[in-house]
Image (cartoon, rainbow, N blue to C red):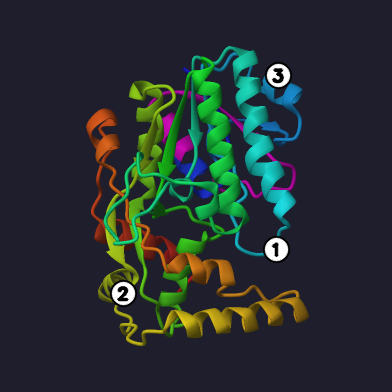
Amino acid sequence: MRAFVTGGTGFIGGAVVRHLLQAGHEVRALVRPGAGTRQLDGLPVERVAGDLSDGQALQQAMAGCGWVFHVAALYSYWGYRPGDFYQANVEGTRRVLEAARMAGAERIVYTSSVSALGFHGDHTPATEDTPSSLEDRIGPYQRTKFKAEEVARRMARQGLPVVIVNPSTPVGVGDHKPTPSGQIIVDMLTGRMFGYVNTGLNIVDVEDVAAGHLLAAERGRPGERYILGGENLTLKQILDLLAEISGRPPVRLRIPHSVALAWSYVDVARARWQPRHIPTATPDKVRLSRRYEFFDPGKAVRELGLPQTPAREALAKAVEWYRSHGYAP
């Protein structure tokens, strides 16, 4: 099978590309001009220059591809305008899915996010069916991923063979940027993580997320959502595991959310005065931390056969990769 992949130069997309190749598929990857290509370097991948703004060009690039994986998204908490998120995440998704329909793709996998799903205030794990609303989303990334998923679900009801996957918090090898979750690990390893807030995340090995994409193409039901997740851990549990794995001192200082929020405004103000400074916390990130992002991947495990690598093992892979690539001592 020939597969077309958007976002192949990113963390999740790069892992999807590697898994497709390992499974014997041919890969054609959309590469945005100016994007770093370390994820693709040395791999037998056909590269097509372009972006998500030209639907006709996307359709031409997909010609002859039976599978389409739309992994690309704008994921950031700083440095972009709300309109940038809308164009990339909502309109970009609409163009990719329409192009795939016109190109006659047999199966499309759209990479959404758990940010588009509901949550429980009592910290019990949410599922694909937990009620969610646009009003509950915090920040432009969450709002546009929610809207983009609505686009995908509507087109599925119209007959498009699109399966939706919702990765939680992936960690592991190949996080060159690094992602916001990866930055937590790097900060811990470099001694810049001086405290924590009470929050929780669902940790999943990025290799399991990539495998889940292929399984969704093979076994997923069009129009359905599948949480590609792993273990639910508090941030303190994650930091304690990282301390054990790395040999670094544990982080003991718990920071109240009110203090973290006040600091985030100071940090953002500094970033506006000093353009090279990237804030370690933004008000949106702190507000999100009040929610425990705990999720139940049981549906993906049952229906797709999603692998479940232990969180400790996934974090150990990440630590080794960051150290071996010069991100941390």
Residue under circle 2? 236
Q: Can residue 5 be seen in this view?
A: no
Q: Point out which mark residue 60 bears.
A: 3
For image coordinates 56% across by 17% down, the residue present is: 65
Number of residues whose C-alpha sits closer than 10 Å to that of mark 2, classed few (under 14), some (14–19) or many (20 or more): many
- Amino acid under disc 2: Lys
For image coordinates 36% across by 41% down, the residue present is: 227
Residue 204: x and y in percent read 34, 52
Marks 3 and 2 in Cβ contact (< 8 Å): no
Residue under circle 1? 79
The one of 121 and 190 positioned closer to us in this rendering: 121
Residue 262: x and y in percent read 56, 83
SS category of the residue bearing label 1: loop
The residues bearing labels 1 and 3 have C-alpha atoms spaced at a distance of: 32 Å
The one of 320 and 153 positioned closer to us in this rendering: 153
SS category of the residue bearing label 3: helix
Number of residues whose C-alpha sits closer than 10 Å to that of mark 3, classed few (under 14), some (14–19) or many (20 or more): few
Q: What stretch is highlighted in magenta?
A: 16-41
Residue 125: x and y in percent read 28, 53
The residues bearing labels 3 and 2 have C-alpha atoms spaced at a distance of: 48 Å
